[in-house]
Every structure is written in C-alpha cells, then in structure tokens.
Image (cartoon, rainbow, N blue to C red):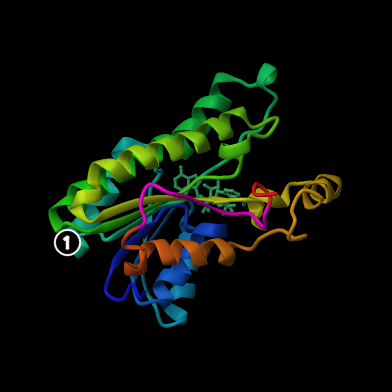
C-alpha cells in the first residue's frame, strides 16, 4: 500500500482536502509537491509535513494557466526526474442562479476546476507513459453526479471531470497508469464553512451518516487509489459522502 519513494503532486494542497491528501501521502513515504496559489498556505503545509517527518516541496502555480502548469512540471522533472502520482484537487466555487450567472463566473470555475485537470494530466502522462506506471486521482464532487441549484458551473466542471476520467483511463490502462475520480459529499473545509446554519441543517437531513465528512475521510480513499493496492481499478468514481447519493 505504501507510496514510499514515490513523487506525488497534489494541486490545491495549501488548505482543506488537498492538504489532508498531501499529509497522508507524505506520511506513507511519498515526496509530495504541494501546489497552491498562496505562498503562505504552501509554506505552512510544507512545514507541517516536514515537522511530521515527511518530505515536501512547495510550488506556487495557477493550475488554470497553461504557462504556469508547464513551468511547474518543468521544475518537477528537473528536480525529481519523474512523477508517479498526480492528485488533481484544486477547485473553487462561484455560485449563482443560472439566470444571474456571468460569463466570468462560468469561465473561472470551468478553467480552475476542469481545464486544470486536462492541463496537469496531459503533462503527467508524458512522463508516466515513459515509466509505464502512474496514478491520477481527480477530485470531482457529488454535485457532478446529482447537481445542485446555484452551482451549474461547478456541476458542469465536476461532471466533466468524471467524463474526462473515464476517457483518459481507457487511453493509458495498458501502460500501467490508472485514472480514477473521487466524488466527496459535504466535507468540512473553507469551501463549506460559508454555509448558513439553516443550510447545514438542511444538508444534514439528506446525509444518512448524520454528519459532514472530514478532509481525512477523502484522503484515505485517495491514498488507496494512489497505492499499488488499486492496481486493477481504473476509470471509476468513488463517492465519499456518508451515504448521501446512495440513499
Ligand atoms: P478549499 O478549502 O477552498 O481549498 C482549495 C485549495 O485549492 C486551496 O489550497 C486553493 O489555494 C487551491 N486553489 C484554488 N484555485 C487554484 C488555482 N487556480 N491553482 C492552484 N490552486 C488553487 O477547498 P476544499 O473544500 O478543500 O476542496 C478541494 C477540492 O475538493 C475541490 O476541487 C472541491 O471542488 C472538491 N470538493 C470539496 C467538497 C467540500 O465539501 N469541501 C465537496 C466535494 C468536492 P489557496 O490556498 O492558495 O487559496
């Protein structure tokens, strides 16, 4: 199961789910490249990993920017020579009812949440195909499966990730590269801290487990998909949602 010695890139790892994933992979022995936008968040995540005995390297880059992604992969390859695990986690929301949604609200979410997955996976594949092994884990959302009013941009991006995962997995399965998606339900992070108490109560009534998930709940599944134990699993979407979509 252990990712010892593996080189892993986690996008959006400065906070929330990405940071929990970075900590989990580093605890298993991977060298983790912590990507995010904000330098202070990157530095804090790297410091936390190092303080717990792990290995980490911070790289600031906007993963919706083709130039930034190229530069980041250039650095990774020049420093480490390869990439074994890619976790496409960076994401934002810009919620608005469709009638009021601006072009900018749409483009920003599609570029950050979906185009970034294409840009980073395309780069990672170049090296994984040569190595004839690799793991790509894309963070989708239950919103991409069941939708949510006010989130048509986010739902489209997260559903797009699922289609992308299924198509990409077919292209590289014979090369020892697995591409899977994880679809979290409602997880306690900055992204969900904006919910009002009323919205939280309404949500809880739809979650059979009766509580929100934690970033660590998601990190456990990502770590499994990043490991050798998931050898025969590809093109799948695994929900981590306390039973929300299964009920
Ligand atoms: P979060 O706490 O808001 O953290 C998002 C992270 O992404 C931050 O580190 C942020 O960087 C980074 N980021 C944003 N835009 C970026 C960009 N253009 N380039 C690089 N990094 C960028 O979010 P979260 O709740 O942990 O969510 C993580 C992922 O899980 C997202 O894809 C989200 O859609 C998905 N998800 C979350 C939930 C949930 O309930 N929380 C549920 C389902 C799916 P800075 O720290 O520098 O700002």
Q: Is residue 207 left or right of residue 139?
A: right
Q: Does the residue labelled 1 lie within 8 Å of ligand 1?
A: no
Q: Which residue lies furthest to the left in this view?
A: 130
Residue drawn at 58 percent across, 27 percent down: 105
The magenta stretch is 233-243
Q: Is residue 90 left or right of residue 4?
A: right
Q: Name the quarter where the N terminus is drawn.
A: bottom left
Q: Nearer the viewer, residue 124 or 141?
A: 141
| Front-most of residues 190 and 177 | 177
Q: Does the magenta stretch include residue 236?
A: yes
Quadrant in the rendering for residue 15: bottom right
Coordinates of residue 39 in the picture (x, y in percent): 46, 56
Magenta span main SS: loop
Residue 110 image offset from top left, x and y in percent: 48, 31
Query: What residue do we see at 58% from left, 65% from top?
Result: 217
Residue 233 x/y as whole percent? 36, 56
Number of marks drawn: 1
State the residue at coordinates (51%, 35%): 159
From this view, report whether residue 44 is shown above or below residue 128. below
> Mark 1 — residue?
81
> In this image, 139 relative to 84: left or right?
right
**Where 236 sits versus 30, above or below?**
above
- Asked if residue 97 can be seen in this view, the reply is yes
């Amino acid at each position: 199961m252990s990712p010892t010695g593996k080189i892993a890139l986690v996008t959006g790892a400065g906070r929330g789910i990405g940071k929990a994933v970075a900590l989990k992979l580093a605890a298993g022995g991977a060298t983790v490249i912590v990507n995010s936008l904000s330098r202070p968040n990157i530095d804090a995540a790297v410091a936390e990993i190092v303080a717990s005995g792990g290995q980490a390297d911070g790289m600031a880059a906007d993963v919706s920017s083709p130039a930034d992604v190229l530069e980041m992969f250039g650095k990774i390859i020049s420093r480490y020579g390869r990439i074994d695990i890619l976790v496409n986690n960076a994401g934002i929301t810009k919620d608005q009812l469709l009638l009021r949604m601006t072009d900018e609200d749409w483009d920003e979410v599609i570029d950050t949440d979906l185009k970034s997955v294409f840009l980073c996976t395309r780069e990672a594949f170049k090296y994984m195909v040569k190595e004839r092994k690799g793991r790509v884990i894309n963070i989708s959302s239950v919103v991409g499966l069941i939708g949510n009013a006010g989130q048509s941009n986010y739902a489209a991006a997260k559903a797009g990730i699922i289609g992308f995962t299924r198509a990409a997995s077919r292209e590289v399965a014979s090369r020892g590269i697995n591409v899977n998606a994880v679809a979290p339900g409602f997880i306690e992070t900055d992204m969900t801290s904006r919910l009002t108490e009323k919205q939280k109560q309404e949500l809880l009534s739809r979650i059979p487990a009766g509580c929100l998930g934690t970033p660590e709940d998601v990190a456990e599944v990502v770590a499994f998909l990043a490991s050798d134990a998931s050898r025969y699993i590809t093109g799948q979407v695994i929900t981590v949602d306390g039973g929300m979509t299964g009920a």
